[in-house]
Amino acid sequence: MGILRTIIWVVLAVALAIFSAANWEVVVIKIWPGQEAEAKLPVLVIVSFLLGMLPMWIALRTSRWSLKRRLDSSERQLADMRALANRPVEPAIVPTPVRDVPPTPDDLFSTDKS
């Protein structure tokens, strides 16, 4: 994958060098009426490309930063859950049963003590 990326960058660099050599001319840019600037065409194209790419690069970095924070938070929660799941189990204390039915009068006044 790295070699493919390198090949693409080399092809782009060669194409940019050929474009720059073929179009190395002065271009007049009208900024406002009465104001003009002169620049070489390849410089103008490269600067325009970089200025157009800047907002998308900032948006990408912001998105990656936000997603990285969310992933880190999820990984911390997962580690906490795993720690809870792997803790030693304490023996359960069995509570004494509670009698839900109230005693009948026969149970209260019974003389038979067995």
Image (tube, rainbow, N blue to C red):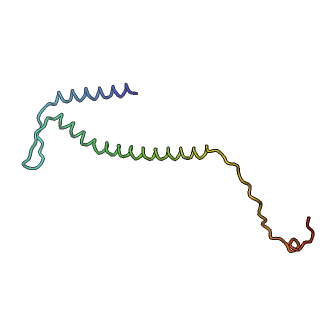
Q: Quadrant of the C terminus?
A: bottom right
Residue 109's spot in the image, x, y percent? 88, 74
Q: Which of the pair 74/14 is nearer the observer?
A: 74
**Residue drawn at x 20%, y 37% as measured from the top left:** 45
Residue 106 relative to residue 28: left or right: right
Point 16% across, 31% down: residue: 23
Tell me where residue 102 sits by quadrant.
bottom right
109 displayed left or right of 96: right
Q: Indicate whether 88 appears above or below 6.
A: below
Percent coordinates x, y for residue 67 in the rendering: 42, 45
Quarter occupied by residue 50: top left
Camera-side residue of 82 and 1: 82
Image quadrant containing the N terminus: top left
| Residue extending farthest left | 34
Q: Residue at x 77, y 60 (%)?
A: 97
Q: Nearer the viewer, residue 89 or 50?
A: 89
Q: Is residue 50 left or right of residue 106?
A: left
Residue lying furthest right:
112
Q: Position of residue 71 (x, y in %)?
A: 46, 44
Residue appearing at x 14%, y 30% in the figure: 24
- Between 36 and 64, the residue placed more toward the observer is 64
